Amino acid sequence: MNDLTEINSSNPVIKTENKNICYLDINRPDKLNALSEEVLTLLISNLNEISESAELKVIILRSQGNAFCAGHDLRQMMENHNQDYFDNLFSLCSEFMVKLTQMPQVVIARVHGLATAAGCQLVAQSDIAVCSDNAMFATSGVNLGLFCSTPSVAVSRNVPRKIAAEMLFTGDFIDANYAKQIGLINHIVSKDNLDDKINEIGSIDAVGGLELGAVPLTGIAIAKAPSGSGLRGFIIRKEPKGRGGRKTGNPPGIEGSTLVSGDKCLILEDVTTTGGSALQACQRLVEMGCEIVGCITILDREEGGYEAFTDAEIPLYPLLTLSDIVNA
């Protein structure tokens, strides 16, 4: 593991690599890792470089010190109180945040301590967010007369509309448990186990799921993977046709790339209702000796699927829930 304690540098942004994982650290602990012009410029430059890599599969965003990110550097903003500076600062921030959503790699936020304003937006922009049990989140600009208008877009896409409005209008902090409950983060772990959980999610060998819904999703996932990443795809037929393993060594009904015992597999699904079919697919992979890292579904209809996955101790990551649509 690329441990945070190993990093000793004066650079405000540090990029390190370990196999197919890239770590991007904001290194301004004395400023609570605030996003200065220099930090944003370096983050953009690093993302541009990483996006061209054929080997890197995962980006982990981290920070040094006792906070994840306190948003914009307010001291720098006060010292440069002119329109040109503000135009450039917010342009850089927008470019960085949009770039995160366009990366071919999976972006995971590793959050500890405070994540406020643009720092909270950074969490919301990431594909997956894992936080320590001491993490706190807020869109607190309103308390300084600076409404978090840009963070409001990303946050309101992660959490229900009325909860987002309350966060934005009050600036109140929420703890890790509530952040998970409303959908801002995926997992809470103790600070000591944070890196282990990140590595578990970031190391995926194969993606796939049940026909027919998972067929296009698997194709997109493989197409988005960097060239040479080694990510494999598979499809599980509801009714085996007796031929799946003839060339691949897989059991009948599991087609595509060869899967072997120990592979970490991510299940893809278009719509989750009760979760029964997807969990049956998971069981077939477990019987092969594979490990199920989780299931990503486009829509959770909230009819028991999340609870079923929880009971099976498999994380379910819905991109949308029925409540999101109804309350939009």
Image (cartoon, rainbow, N blue to C red):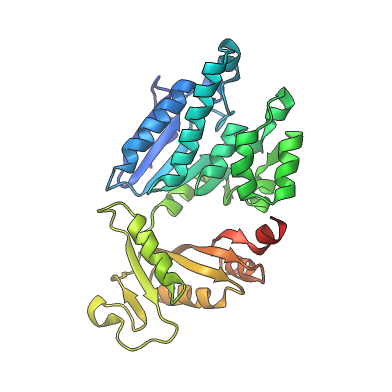
Total numbered labels: 0
Q: Quadrant of the C terminus?
A: bottom right
Give left or right: position of 58 versus 160: left
Can I make out residue 207 in this image? no
Q: Please report the residue visible at 29 percent of the width from the left and 42 percent of the height from the top.
A: 52
Residue 194 in the image, given as x and y percentages of width and height: 51, 44
Give left or right: position of 145 versus 75: right
Between 94 and 280, which is closer to the camera in this rendering?
94
Point out the residue furthest to the left here.
Answer: 247
In the rendered image, which quarter is residue 321 located in? bottom right
In the rendered image, which quarter is residue 219 located in? bottom left
Q: Please report the residue visible at 57 percent of the width from the left and 70 percent of the height from the top.
A: 272
Q: Please report the residue visible at 28 percent of the width from the left and 71 percent of the height from the top.
A: 258
Q: Quadrant of the N terminus?
A: top left
Point out the residue furthest to the top here.
Answer: 79
Q: Is residue 145 above or below residue 190?
A: above
Can I make out residue 97 in this image? yes
Q: Please report the residue visible at 57 percent of the width from the left and 44 percent of the height from the top.
A: 124
Residue 295 in the image, given as x and y percentages of width and height: 50, 64
Q: Is residue 202 above or below residue 74?
A: below
Give left or right: position of 280 versus 169: left
Residue 222 in the image, given as x and y percentages of width and height: 34, 60
Q: Is residue 237 above or below residue 65?
A: below
Between 33 and 88, which is closer to the camera in this rendering?
88
Residue 284 in the image, given as x and y percentages of width and height: 43, 77
